[in-house]
Amino acid sequence: MNKQKNVSPWWIVAFAFAILWLLITGMPFYYLIITSFKSLGDFLSGGLFKMPVTWEVSNYIRVFQGGFLYYLANSLIVVLVSLALLLFLSALAAYPLSRMTFKLNKPIYTIIVAAMSVPIYITLIPLFVMAIRTGFYDTLWALVGPNIAFNLPMSVFILVSFMRSIPKELEEAAEIDGCGKFTTFFRVIFPLSRSGLATLGIYNGVVIWNEFIFVMVLTQSQAVRTLPLAVWQFQGQYSSNIPVIMAVLTLSSLPIILLYVFGQDKLVKGMMAGAVKG
């Protein structure tokens, strides 16, 4: 006999709130997408959430003709290089702070944590002068350094907590097998930290992808501008053509949405793994 399972009223309430939250958060994306396919006349004459009379692909054609793919390539280069160096340096710094005992452990860790409170905007003028004197001004490499420096303290802070949860018996077993500190790090600690690194990669990737102020200050020519500046320039060029601006925003947000869709399981696993001590 099949037993009927009683559904708790709290599950019904939770499901109703989930549907309501989905509508609230999904409505801006719905408006963004349908507006990007409208003509200017359709946008001005129709309702805000009304479906397009004719689906205009020309808005996206204008965006691609305006150099969108070039801006996209610049953003991908900056994000990938910055993330690779950031995660590697964060893991190298977090390993001795979480697994070794030495006199300067706590002072160094305290300085790193305190660096999280440094405002970005007070460093813009020194960064601008430094970029000019080193010859990196108006290059993509001028954006990599600040992205690493300002995201490094938070990344080290999270990875230290994550690596402390790894059982010490694994490290001791590697040392018994004759592994040194570097070998233990690359063969034991670093592979076991992949969930934490994936979480940091998604979080920092979104932050670096949306970075605007560094690109505004440290670059000048359009050849090295990234997507946030491209959106700003398209907004100035098509300030009266809202559908074209919506097309730019749709294409700019698409890589981050795809990153979250394919990486959400790693994000959740990384958060759960960092919260459970071995």
Image: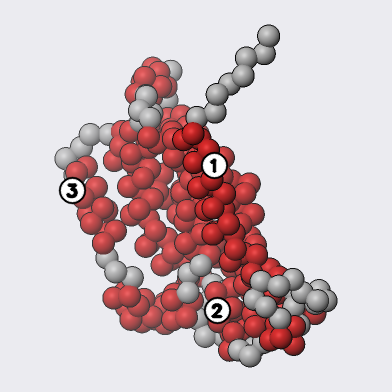
> Which residue is the site of mark 1?
15
Residue at the extreme top? 1
1 and 3 marks in contact (CB < 8 Å) = no
Q: Mark 1 or mark 2, which has the lower sequence index?
A: 1
Whole-number angstrom distance, CA of label 1 to CA of label 2: 40 Å
Question: Which-is-in-front pick, marks 1 and 2?
Answer: 1
Whole-number angstrom distance, CA of label 1 to CA of label 3: 48 Å
> Is 122 positioned to the left or the right of 102 in the image?
right
Mark 3 surroundings: few (<14), some (14-19) or many (≥20) residues within 10 A = few
Q: How is the image coloured?
A: secondary structure
> Which residue is the site of mark 2?
229
**Which secondary structure lies at badge 3?**
helix
Quadrant holding the C terminus: top left
Mark 2 surroundings: few (<14), some (14-19) or many (≥20) residues within 10 A = many
Mark 1 surroundings: few (<14), some (14-19) or many (≥20) residues within 10 A = few
Q: Image point 74% across, 78% down: which residue?
A: 38
Q: How many marks?
A: 3
> Is 162 positioned to the left or the right of 97 in the image?
right
Q: Quadrant of residue 243?
A: bottom right
Q: Which amino acid is tagged 1?
A: Phe
Question: Which-is-in-front pick, marks 1 and 3?
Answer: 1
> Which residue is the site of mark 3?
107
Q: Nearer the viewer, residue 114 or 102?
A: 114
**Which secondary structure lies at badge 2?**
helix
Q: Mark 3 or mark 2, which has the lower sequence index?
A: 3
**Which secondary structure lies at badge 1?**
helix
**Where residue 99 appears, x then y in whole percent?**
31, 33
Say above or below: 82 vs 221. Answer: above
**Where residue 88 appears, x then y in whole percent?**
46, 48
Whole-number angstrom distance, CA of label 3 to CA of label 2: 39 Å
Q: Image point 37% across, 34% down: which residue?
A: 275
